[in-house]
Amino acid sequence: MLLIGNGRVVTGNQEQPLIEDGSVVLDGNTVLEVGNYRDLKEKYADATFVDAKGGLIMPAFINTHEHIYSAMARGMSINGYNPNGFLEILDGLWWTIDRNLDNELTYLSAMTTYIDCIKNGVTTIFDHHASFGEIEGSLFAIEKAARETGVRSCLCYEISDRDGEDKMKAAVKENVDFANHAKKDDSDMIAGMMGMHASFTISDKSMEYAMSRKPEDIGCHIHVAEGIEDLHSCLKVHNQRIVDRLYDWKVLGDKSLLAHCIYINPHEMDLIRDTNTCVVHNPESNMGNACGCPPTMELVHRGIVCGLGSDGYTHDVLESWKVANVLHKHHLCDPNAAWGEVPKMLFEYNANIANRYFKKPLGVLKPGAAADVIVVDYTPNTPMTASNINSHLLFGVCGKDVRTTIANGNILMKDRELLHIDEKEVLAKVREGAMRLANKINGRGNA
């Protein structure tokens, strides 16, 4: 049993959003009680004490669109890479990397990503993987890293025609094998989806092949209208808009995730809402790739469950919140935009999405919820109340302020020290792997 106390508890529970001198008691992998620090300290005197040292005690964060395979791109230079537009970014950078990933490099990419997640207080991710250099077993390699690091993960492999029919079919098989494997697991720490790259890289033949083999009770995780080229291709090849095509193929539904949704119209928004399909907004990636600004505020106003992801651009979801906040204000020329919508996406909708795959309530501190808790170094220099929590988090906190991370009742990081991982050893192997990958891509062999 753990007792985290001596700090302000930000519960994520609207019935009692803030407890000034609060505490959270964890019994195994479940929140047992939330309340006054002194009272709970006396009641659970034998519990192991985790001192918040006056900081914030919060539910751990959730990231609903990650890309583990991109981890080794940081600092990499690719010969001849000078993109002009989104398609050249995809082919010249990301598809070049994933075509050269083997399962060892995928595992190392997952380890460094998960370490960064823990450091930034993220304990649940939805990852969208690609490693066309080695497909079979790649999701299981990521699962190995997830188990070792303790981060709850919903995984999928992106199906695409870009490297031919054999690899498309191998991608479908990897999704099916992993999803069936995850269904048999009772830890509530792993889940699987049917991953798809995007409409413009999946033919009708391949769509039929994938959807006819999709296990029941899982949805699809797919990029939608991230670039205008995706929409143009769908109109030209299929004579319909992207969301209409996905609706016809029964891709939409309450277990499916549509990442981006930049170039969609009101009719498509209605289809997404009426099928209870989820969307994930990735602001930094959209800006960095010069893809455009999605109509995210309208999606939220229409009642669509729209989460917040990072697209692998960062592992600090508070950073994604800050960027989304200014992006939509700037885009709409409205200083009132995004104040309420983006925190709703990060804290409420991300939890809504996650609990479509995981059983215990996530993103909230209340009895019966998952024992996913973080302690954040933050002492407000202005009054902090239940009504201004979001303002304090937005302007006063970043991911690196997380001091302690607990997932599923296990202390993964305490006082900024990873307790169950030899970080230096892991990162040394990651650097070796990144060098091997860069040399392979640039034709210098494996040395």
Image (tube, rainbow, N blue to C red):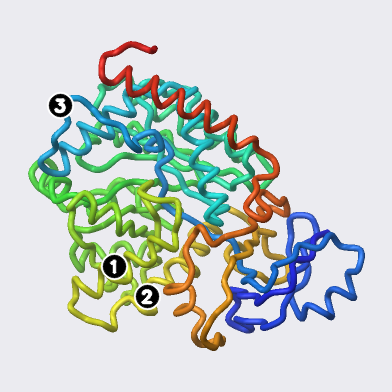
Quadrant in the picture for the N terminus: bottom right
Give how far apart the Cα atoms at labels 2 and 3 are.
41 Å
**Amino acid beneath label 1:** Thr
State the residue position of label 2: 341
At horizontal 38% and vertical 61% (from top left) the residue drawn is: 320
Residue 59, quarter of picture: bottom right
From the top left corner, tell me how far across and down residue 160 is, in percent.
Answer: 29, 32
**N-term-proximal mark, 2 vs 3:** 3
Q: Label for residue 248?
A: none
State the residue position of label 3: 80
**For discs 3 and 1, the disc positioned in front in the rendered view:** 3
**Above or below for 305 versus 65:** below
**Above or below for 447 versus 70:** above
Give how far apart the Cα atoms at labels 3 and 1 are.
35 Å
Residue 158, quarter of picture: top left
**N-term-proximal mark, 3 vs 1:** 3
From the top left corner, tell me how far across and down residue 141 is, in percent.
Answer: 53, 28
Of 191 and 333, the residue lying toward us = 333
